[in-house]
Amino acid sequence: MWVGACIDMRYDAFSRCHPAVNFGFFAIAIVLSVILVHPAYLAVSAVCAAAYYLALKGYKGWKAVLGMIPLFFVVALLNPLFNAMGDTVLFSLFGRPFTYESLVYGACIAAMLVSVLLWFLCYGAVMTSDKFTSLFANVIPALSLILVMVLRLVPSYGKKARQISGARQCIGKSGSGTKREKLQGGITVLSALTGWALEGSVVTADSMRARGYGAGKRTTFQVYRLTLQDGVIALLLLLFAAVTIAAAAAGAAQAAFLPSLHIAPVRGALSVSGLGAWGLFLLLPTLLHLREVILWHTLTSDI
């Protein structure tokens, strides 16, 4: 019920935190998901990223999450075909050994890729352009503006391309039929999209010049202030991240795959505390979201 009712970002408590808290969380989550190649840590990262993305997008998020499953298997199964290292040969394919160690390594690489992609999807939903500009405008004003404009190119161009294709279909030029007609239709859409992009860049430059861009200190549309709740959330995130990093530095997250497997077992106080802190760190945004949704439904049911 909660995943379907919470598409509105106003329901997400973590999205309403200070941009520094949001950016810090995603930076640590993505970096540690790449560094910690232990299978247990990667599985926790992928599951938590999928849970938070579904919390943000609701039923619409299932398409992206389920789309990661074939990507996982493709990457996991392709790695042994290119990397024949490993002591345990399962079978031979195209004259090359298909090893168990290489398969496990490919599965970990695939889990890392899936988790990082999902965290970037969550980042795109939470860290809006206004948040990014507010956070880095005074530090790197030119670079922050370029990054914001670049990040919005792909979705805006895709939306405009669909509009152009829809307009062509309305006048009977859908581009379907022979391959030649499809190619001509695609070239026409690309030409129109290129002209729109160039015209838009000129209009944007004139608008920025007319508004006095670069004449003074930059301001943002919304003013973000650190609150007590932001401080508590930031302290919890730092505490969980510190425990995770300390456990990993002590060897709780060690993993070697080639030519033989050497994966640190998840047992003992050190390993359990490190993996538990990693899970709590990644689950905190989802837990905040669930708390907000439960509170919202409780209040509305009493009306």
Image (spheres, rainbow, N blue to C red):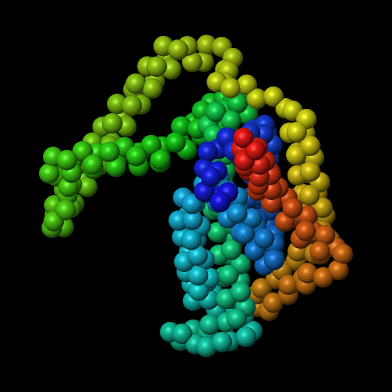
Q: Residue at x 13, y 58 (%)?
A: 178
User: In the rendered view, would you say 192 is above or below 120?
Assistant: above
Query: Which image quadrant is residue 123 in?
Result: top right
* Nearest the eye: 259 or 88: 88
Q: Which residue reaches farthest front? A: 303
Is 38 on the left or on the right of 274, as rendered?
A: left
Is 265 on the left or on the right of 7, as rendered?
A: right
* Nearest the eye: 194 or 288: 288
Query: Which image quadrant is residue 9 in?
Result: top right
Is 146 on the left or on the right of 182, as rendered?
A: right
Is 247 on the left or on the right of 56, as rendered?
A: right
The answer to whether residue 53 of the structure is visible from this angle is: no
Q: Position of residue 105 (x, y in %)?
A: 61, 71
Q: Position of residue 286 (x, y in %)?
A: 65, 48
User: In the rendered view, would you say 78 is above or below 217?
Assistant: below
User: In the rendered view, would you say 264 is above or below 233?
Assistant: below
User: In the rendered view, would you say 282 is above or below 297?
Assistant: below
* Nearest the eye: 145 or 1: 1
Q: Residue at x 67, y 60 (%)?
A: 44
Q: Position of residue 249 (x, y in %)?
A: 81, 58
Q: Residue at x 34, y 39 (%)?
A: 159
Q: Position of residue 293 (x, y in %)?
A: 63, 43
